[in-house]
Amino acid sequence: MLNKKNTIFLINCSLAIIFIIVLFVLLFSKNNIDKKAKNDTKFLQEYLPAETNKNIPLLEKENDKIYDAVFEENFKNIVKQTAKQETQINKDLYPILDLIGYNADEIKEKIKIFKNNGMDFGTNKKLMSEIMAKFGNKLDDETLGQIKENHIIFLCITNELHKNYFSRDDISFMEYKNALSSLFILEQKIYKENLTNEEYEDFFDMTKEETNETIAGLVEIAPEFEYYNSDATAEEIYEKIPRWKLERIIEFSKTQSLMELEIGEQVNTGELTIDEAIKHTENSFKIYLESAKEILDKEEFHLMFASVENQF
């Protein structure tokens, strides 16, 4: 069986949020880039949404102190800055919206639903706590509110991009990766405009000029499929497994990833309890492994799934 702690993580964060957080972590520590499979999720557990649904247990966080009374009061003030404002969609996002088939009004409705379902809670509040701790005395509440809203828009559109890519055949992997790069680059714009070069570099561990290249590089190394072998690289898998087999694995991986996203949303909306979602997630993961096993030989399967091949 899957480790329950890791399974709950998968359910609550979903693949889209996982990818976003991993990339943010890498942006904060650009010298610690690891191209291995995403097997260690311990550092991500703090992002589990604790207030979006009563089915989700409150988890202890090592950084509870950052969510003190002062922070909560300041956070409420920041929320008020954007609560009555209409969501503004940057025109630079239009090509991405065209790719996934939404106009500005439709994505605004998606963002509203995204907020109501609590999908933004963990990552957004964590990020804002870091920014407020670092720049709370420099940035006014209006600017902090804009940063918060900008981040929610980014999270929602990225989530929609993932869902559409996983469920459709008319979005190529290259289009998907280019759109991801564009989203991350646009998301950084507000920081570049409001932080000095020194502040930006101190916070993101890179200069403003390095950001675009770093983001493009990180997105570029993302493989087309989920694999679970911490000793293998995507390059090795591409080299040793025939392309026709990888095409099938990609289909299986996209199907499983879409199921994880949908399960995560159902937990946030209260349609599934944690225990129910664990069973669904374990089942989808088992189907992914069994489907892969049908077309890969023993050596190929070990290369891709060594870390989990004996779990079922």
Image (tube, rainbow, N blue to C red):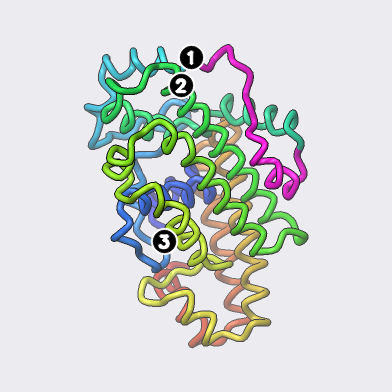
In front: mark 2 or mark 3? 2
Q: Distance from label 2 to label 1 (Cα)? A: 5 Å
Q: Amino acid at mark 2?
A: Gly
- Are dots 2 and 1 in contact, CB under 8 Å? yes
User: 69 above or below 151?
Assistant: above
- Secondary structure predominantly adopted by residues drawn in magenta: helix
Residue for badge 3: 38
Seen from the viewer's position, the closer of residues 174 and 281 is 174
Residue for badge 2: 145
Residue for badge 1: 81
Specify whether residue 123 is in view: no
Identify the magenta region: 80-102
- Are dots 2 and 3 in contact, CB under 8 Å? no
Whether the magenta-drawn stretch holds residue 10 is answered as: no
Give SS at disc 1.
helix
Q: Give the residue drawn at x 56%, y 27%.
A: 115
Q: Amino acid at mark 3?
A: Lys
